[in-house]
Amino acid sequence: MSTATPQQAQAPQGVQPLSPDEEAVVRSLNRVIYALPRAMDADMVREQRLPVIEYLTLMHLSEAPDRQLRMSDLATACEMSLSGMTRVVHRLEDQGLIQRVRSEKDARGWNAVLTDAGFDRLREAWPTNLAAVRRHFLDHLVGLDLKTLAAALQNIAT
């Protein structure tokens, strides 16, 4: 009995098979999706004792009006579930970096508010994050049209 590998199988009717370059991009992207966040997180934890998700949480709050967001909006911004975001916020709240307050617009909802200590911690961690972004990502894109790449990645993400 012989089994066909995906490379040997015929593409569905009307679907163009991948060129070698296209296949290389798709396979590389699969690796990047997992390797990049792990590498950046390792740098942030080692140098700052601040996981990337906590850094991103502080960053999104720092950019929000009055440095606060509804918990559900913060979860969406960080690409997390609400329950996962709640755990992150509790950890940051225990460190005094975030405060949770009742929403003024909806008494049932909660907002996460970046404290002054949280903003200071974000500023302290920023150089490490910047170095990690450059070392693990941007330095590998030298010579590419970043504006076009950014637009293509945005189109994929929406």
Image: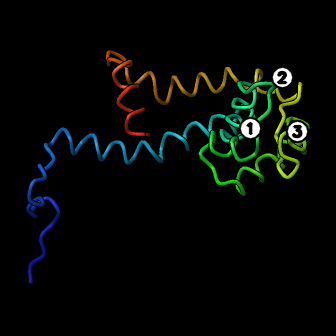
In this rendered view, identify the residue nearer to me: 50 or 53: 53
Q: Residue at x 69, y 31 (%)?
A: 60
Residue 66 against residue 12 in the figure, above or below: above
Q: On residue 104, which mark appears?
A: 3
Badge 2 or badge 3: first in the primary sequence: 3
Circle nearer the viewer, 1 or 3:
3
In this rendered view, identify the residue nearer to me: 85 or 25: 85
The chosen color scheme is rainbow
Residue type, numbered disc 2:
Asp
- Label count reads 3
| Residue, disc 1 | 50
Residue type, numbered disc 1:
Leu
Q: Spatial distance from mark 2 to mark 3, Cα to Cα?
A: 26 Å
Q: Secondary structure at mark 3?
A: loop
Residue 20 against residue 58 in the figure, above or below: below
Q: Is residue 46 left or right of residue 138?
A: right
Q: Position of residue 123 (x, y in %)?
A: 76, 21
Q: Secondary structure at mark 1?
A: loop
Q: Residue at x 76, y 26 (%)?
A: 122
| Residue, disc 2 | 120
Q: Spatial distance from mark 1 to mark 2, Cα to Cα?
A: 13 Å
Circle 3 packing at 10 Å, graded few (<14), some (14-19), many (20+), is few
Q: Secondary structure at mark 2?
A: helix
Residue type, numbered disc 3:
Glu
